[in-house]
Image (cartoon, rainbow, N blue to C red):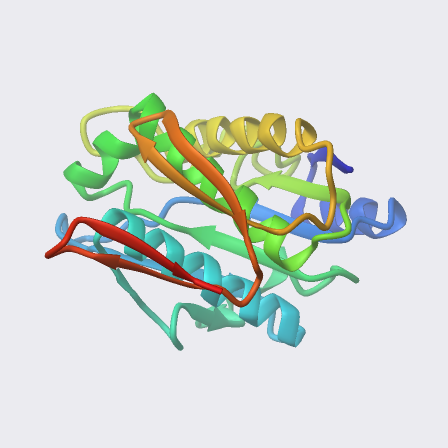
Amino acid sequence: MYKIKFYKGNYSTRQSKANNDKAVAYVEHHFNSSSSSTANYAVVVTGSNASRTSKNWGRWYAKAVATFFGTQVSGDNGILVGGWNGRGDGNLKHTNMPAILLEPLFASNPLHAEIIRSERGQTDLARILVESIQRFFPNGGLIAFSVGHKYKKSNPNDRGAALAGGGNEADYAEKVLKKAAVMLEAIDQIGTARTIRVMRGDKVLLETEVDEDALVVWDTERGLLNISE
């Protein structure tokens, strides 16, 4: 079973509390921002002392987001170890468990901002995060969630970057994490087989379990999803 806890306070305080609670994983959610309104990639920050699990988890998540939304990945195959010239490192490096800082879309890109504001976009981001947690932490446990920028004692009015067209980064990052928390806590089986879903919008049309090593290929010419086990 998964249990979710949201941590508040300055970043070092959040990490210390998650350590004391023996969380198995730590996620801090942000959205990226740039002077360019066309910036179009996903990236995950890991701490300068990140474990192999943190790096692999971050790369998997960044690639999954980029594939789903049709963007690119940046950094070292989707991750930035130690952050942007050190920025973001302090948000993670004090954790005792695998930890990642998410930058899936750009608040400054109008097309991304529309996705971020939409219920469907938030649900899609939450689902990708949930699937990444199930993949790398299949035995369940306490998952620590941190909303980037928000709830800091040192700067209580910080809300991160402004979204193109209105809104701010932190409030929408929190919406995604809250959706992910509901999904994770609804999972009643741990360590089950890999699940393949066929979806139309938010509606699941088909859901089936396959082997962990199954090769799943979509044939665009034939309109065929082939699963080889």
Lateral position of residue 4 relative to residue 196, left or right: right
Q: Quadrant of the N terminus?
A: top right
Q: Is residue 88 visible?
A: no
Lateral position of residue 134 relative to residue 172, left or right: right
Q: Say if 153 sits above or below 140 in the image.
A: above
Q: Is residue 195 visible?
A: yes
Q: In which quarter of the image is residue 75?
A: bottom left
Query: Where is residue 80 drawn, in percent x and y?
Result: 45, 70
Query: Where is residue 102 drawn, in percent x and y?
Result: 47, 52
Q: Say if 82 sits above or below 4 in the image.
A: below
Query: Where is residue 173 drawn, in percent x and y?
Result: 46, 35
Residue located at (26% from left, 47% from top):
69
Q: In which quarter of the image is residue 186?
A: top right
Q: Pick whichever, 13 or 129, lies toward us.
A: 129
Residue located at (19% from left, 53% from top):
35
Lateral position of residue 19 relative to residue 55, left or right: right
Q: Pick whichever, 103 or 72, lies toward us.
A: 72
Q: Pick whichever, 33 or 50, lies toward us.
A: 50
Q: Quadrant of residue 57?
A: bottom right
Residue located at (69% from left, 55% from top):
137
Lateral position of residue 215 relative to residue 8, left or right: left
Query: Where is residue 219 drawn, in percent x and y?
Result: 20, 58
